[in-house]
């Protein structure tokens, strides 16, 4: 029988925990079941490619909350439990061991998993980085100072290249773009990153794909590039994007396509919601469906979903979820921060600082309005620029005002 009040959250990480905490903070006293495939207490992922990989932090420090704080939430927490299906008509989630749990509201917060190179799945020395176990395995490999090829120069690949280089590995970063993150940041800032990686001794192969991982006796020995060259390697990190964890929803009737398809309130079906990396929803300000793999979004969307669940029950209005997206990345001594969505911008203007000084704020515009602000080592001026993104300020006025502000 359906527990009249129960909320079941599948995915015990940043988004799922945010849902549970918000429900309790806002006074919900019913059952909250949080189901997570991974063992142990929920932990955070951004440190995995930074402090955990470098060894600066012990694993425990990546925990999202300590055991007392988790106890205080009075959750039915089920680590090491994989959800394998949903019967949306009976409102039951089933688990790999055949057990099930009923819900009044279900929150899908199952995140994403790394995309892999098909020929390199069971090859020793080939890594992906999504879990604590992945980070610990790669860290052990780095202690041998290997020749490491990093496939993909997005945020993850670029961060790992930086940490691995600082750990003494011989690093080659391979990107099919002209420079790391060129698709997100545009040419000028991506070229800055390219220079920084090369200055630190990373070889960066641009404009070329990895065609295959070369293996001998089940162990990676290098990669072959699409242009025919081979790069010898002792280890290969594959960082070529991710795939939403929605397979377990097959046959449930819950709509999925590149994530769980939600409405503007993050609701996917009656009593079914989604939050975090797995959730796709039409962002009211951008006029298009988006799915964000950003840590801050996981927390904010978890809060929004919990509040909309409680509002639905109380018969009060639900709210559209319309955040200003935010992501950061640490590479060497650079902290890159982004508000909004720079990708696809048709105008870019550095409004404070300059690339040569490795400290700047740049605005990105599209269709005559400010769509994003990117900062490198300039957190305070960037926070001021956030308001321009939030307001979708007219481009010409925003650039003129900001530049005047700088020179004043
Ligand atoms: C190495 C790394 C570095 C990052 N660095 C940054 C950064 O610097 N800045 C930034 O903004 N973002 C960063 N991110 C992204 C950020 O960590 C994610 O946006 C965030 O973790 C998303 O949280 P989530 O709860 O939606 O999903 P996840 O953290 O992916 O959690 C989903 C959980 O659901 C579990 N699960 C999946 N399927 C099932 C199932 N069927 N049953 C039960 N459980 C299941 C998974 O095992 C997982 O524990 C980084 C990510 C990684 C991997």
Image (cartoon, rainbow, N blue to C red):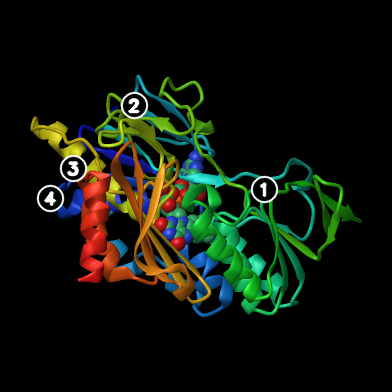
Determine if residue 229 is in view.
Answer: yes
Mark 4 or 1 closer to N-term? Answer: 4
Q: Residue drawn at (64%, 53%), measured in percent from left and top?
A: 152
Nearer to us of marks 2 and 3 is 3
3D distance between C-alphas at marks 2 and 3: 20 Å
Task: Tell me whether circle 2 and circle 3 mark residues in contact (CB < 8 Å).
Answer: no
Disc 4 from disc 3: Cα separation: 11 Å
Nearer the camera: disc 2 or disc 1: 1
Q: CA distance from mark 1 to mark 3?
A: 42 Å
Residue 91 in the image: state x and y as whole percent.
Answer: 34, 26
Mark 4 and mark 1 residues within 8 Å of each other at the beta carbon: no
Which residue is more in the foreground, 304 or 42? 304
Of 67 and 120, nearer the camera is: 120
Q: Nearer the viewer, mark 1 or mark 3?
A: 1
What element does badge 1 sit on?
Answer: loop
Q: Which residue is mark 3?
A: 307
Mark with earlier residue (2, 4): 4
Element on which disc 3 rests: helix
Label 1 sits on residue: 176
Q: Are marks 1 and 3 in contact (CB under 8 Å)?
A: no
The disc, 4 or 3, on the residue closer to the chain's N-terminal end is: 4
Q: Quadrant of the C terminus?
A: bottom left
Residue 65: x percent and y percent? 34, 66
Q: Residue 160's quadrant in the figure?
A: bottom right
Residue displayed at 37% across by 29% down: 92
SS of the residue at dot 2?
loop
């Amino acid at each position: 029988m359906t527990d009249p009040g129960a909320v079941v959250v599948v995915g015990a990480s940043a988004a799922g925990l945010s849902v549970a905490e918000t429900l309790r903070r806002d006074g919900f006293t019913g059952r909250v079941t949080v189901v997570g495939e991974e063992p142990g207490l929920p932990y955070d992922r951004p440190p995995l490619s930074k402090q955990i990989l470098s060894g600066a932090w012990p694993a425990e420090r990546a925990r999202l909350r300590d055991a007392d704080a988790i106890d205080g939430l009075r959750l039915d927490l089920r680590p090491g439990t994989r959800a394998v299906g949903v019967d949306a008509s009976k409102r039951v989630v089933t688990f790999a061991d055949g057990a099930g749990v009923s819900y009044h509201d279900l929150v899908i917060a199952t995140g994403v998993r790394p995309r892999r190179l098909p020929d390199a799945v069971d090859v020793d020395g080939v890594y992906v980085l999504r879990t604590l176990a992945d980070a610990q395995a790669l860290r052990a490999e780095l202690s041998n100072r290997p020749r490491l090829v990093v496939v993909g120069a997005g945020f993850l690949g670029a961060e790992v290249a930086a940490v691995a280089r600082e750990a003494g590995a011989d690093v080659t970063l391979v990107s099919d773009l002209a420079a790391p993150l060129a698709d997100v940041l545009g040419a000028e800032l991506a070229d800055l990153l390219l220079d920084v990686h090369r200055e630190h001794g990373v070889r960066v192969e641009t404009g070329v794909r990895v065609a295959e991982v070369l293996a001998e006796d089940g162990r990676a020995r290098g990669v072959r590039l699409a242009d025919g060259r081979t790069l010898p390697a002792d280890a290969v990190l594959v960082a070529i994007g991710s795939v939403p964890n929605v397979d377990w929803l097959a046959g449930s009737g819950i709509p999925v396509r590149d994530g769980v398809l939600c409405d503007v309130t993050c609701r996917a079906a009656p009593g079914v919601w989604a939050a975090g990396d797995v959730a796709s929803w039409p962002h009211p300000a951008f006029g298009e469906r988006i799915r964000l793999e950003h840590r801050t979004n996981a927390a904010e969307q978890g809060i929004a979903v919990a509040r909309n669940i409680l509002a639905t029950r109380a018969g009060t209005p639900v709210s559209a979820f319309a955040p200003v997206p935010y992501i950061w990345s640490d590479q060497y001594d650079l902290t890159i921060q982004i508000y909004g969505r720079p990708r696809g911008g048709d105008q870019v203007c550095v409004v404070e600082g300059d690339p040569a000084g490795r400290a700047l704020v740049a605005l990105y515009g599209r269709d005559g309005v400010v769509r994003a602000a990117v900062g490198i080592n300039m957190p305070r001026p960037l926070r001021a620029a956030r308001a321009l993104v939030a307001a979708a300020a007219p481009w010409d006025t925003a650039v003129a005002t900001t530049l005047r502000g700088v020179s004043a």
